[in-house]
Amino acid sequence: MAPTIHRLALLGFGPVGRSFSEILSEKYQQVEARYGLRLQIVAAVDRTGGAVDEAGLDPAALVAAKRAGGLCQYPVRGRDGLTGTECLSVTEVDTVLEATSVNMQDGEPGMSYVKQALSAGRNVVMANKGPLVLAYRDVSELAKSNGVSLKFSATLGGSMPTYNLGVRDLAGCTIERVEAVLNSTSHYILCRMNLGDTYEEALAEAQRIEIAERDPTLDVEGWDATNKMVILANSVLNTPTTLADVSRTGITHLSEADLPMTMLATAEKTNSGYRLAVAPVRLPEDHPLATLDPLSMSAIFYTDLIGPMMITVNERGPRPTAAAMLRDVIEIAGGSV
Ligand SMILES: NC(=O)c1ccc[n+]([C@@H]2O[C@H](COP(=O)([O-])OP(=O)(O)OC[C@H]3O[C@@H](n4cnc5c(N)ncnc54)[C@H](OP(=O)(O)O)[C@@H]3O)[C@@H](O)[C@H]2O)c1
């Protein structure tokens, strides 16, 4: 049977967008053979510009163009200053992949890209949390009213299938409690502090192995985990939630006497919804998250019908996040197995 052609626009070509292209160039034939899908990137942009080709861009050539200075360098089709907005209005695509930089002020440029794509009847797969945290309801209603799919399994802990487990595999269960390590940077730093490092020493080591930014505020003050909790509460727990609904405490104020602790995101079912928090917590020694590997993330769902169910990932770098975008694309495109 002829494969189904599924056209993609890739907005953002940082570590995640580039990894997605690399994975596609490696697995193109495997995806076609296994799922009957021919995935074609027909448009891609970064801040330099981009390229559009209805016949499909070469993912390996996109990576090479990026190495040469930016996607505007793509052979023949590359255009200086091409924006996501322009490329969405000139290209017929089935699914838009949104992997631009996170911006927690107004969500741009991702917010406009996602709204434009959904309004035009395109499916959207997001790695960028910003638009979901700031406007979950607007964005998800826009997807519904246009009859298209909005998927974002990459936003809840890299490749960790938090969304798929919570929504699909626990269908029918009441989720009574969630305990999760959703931010690998703060988890790693706290694990080292538990072993005797000062905060400064642990942060320096996290920066050395490139899991902490030069400015680590978003991670160590709990913002990143709080963002994920907002998405998780809205989507998995079906509870309208904004940043103001999550109690947030960082790890920068801890003293030696407070330790050992684990940076935990929790949701506790109450009579009226869920109590949501992100904070360092002293866990019992035998708690599975108390001994979680320093480079892992994990989530435990406590349910009425199944009991607790735990997932863990141990990932470095952007590739697993790009893999999560690929699984969303395959699901949207209806890849048959
Ligand atoms: N890295 C991870 O492991 C990970 C995990 C989960 C989620 N995420 C999220 O996934 C998204 C992508 O991650 P990343 O690490 O690749 O981010 P990044 O390093 O910030 O790269 C973002 C990309 O977006 C492009 N971009 C920014 N503003 C743009 C604009 N106005 N128009 C067109 N392109 C624009 C950048 O262009 P230039 O290249 O020209 O600067 C870059 O290619 C982020 O929102 C991030 O928070 C990342």
Image (spheres, rainbow, N blue to C red):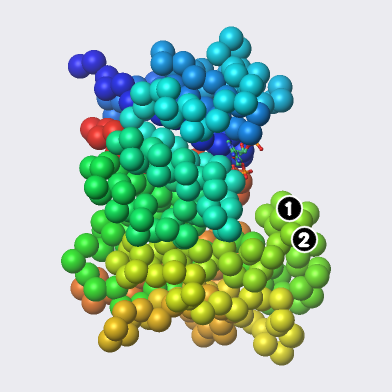
Categorize mark 1 by other alpha carbons within 10 Å: few (<14), some (14-19), many (20+). Answer: few
Q: Could you say where residue 331 lies in the image, as x and y percent from the top left?
A: 30, 40
Which residue is pictured at 60% across the width and 19% down the height? 79
Residue 119, by quadrant, is top left
Q: Amino acid at mark 1?
A: Ile
Q: Is residue 60 above or below residue 247?
A: above
- SS class of the residue under badge 1? loop
To which residue does mark 2 refer?
A: 205
Q: Is residue 259 above or below residue 325?
A: below
Can the viewer see residue 195? no
Depth check: give the residue in front, 232 or 311. Answer: 232
Q: CA distance from mark 2 to mark 1?
A: 6 Å
Q: Is residue 133 above or below residue 337?
A: below
Q: Could you say where residue 325 lies in the image, as x and y percent from the top left?
A: 43, 41
Ligand 1 image position (quadrant): top right
State yes or no: discs 2 and 1 in contact (Cβ < 8 Å): yes
Q: Is residue 32 above or below residue 243?
A: above
Q: Could you say where residue 157 lies in the image, as x and y percent from the top left?
A: 49, 57
Look at the numbered disc 2 and say if its residue's Cβ is closer than 8 Å to ligand 1.
no
Q: Is residue 126 left or right of residue 225?
A: left
Categorize mark 2 by other alpha carbons within 10 Å: few (<14), some (14-19), many (20+). Answer: some
Q: Is residue 227 left or right of residue 165?
A: right
Depth check: give the residue in front, 335 or 221. Answer: 221
Q: Quadrant of the C terminus?
A: top left
Can the viewer see residue 86? yes
Q: Which labelled disc corresponds to residue 209?
A: 1
Toward the bottom, the furthest residue is 257
Q: Is residue 212 left or right of residue 63?
A: right
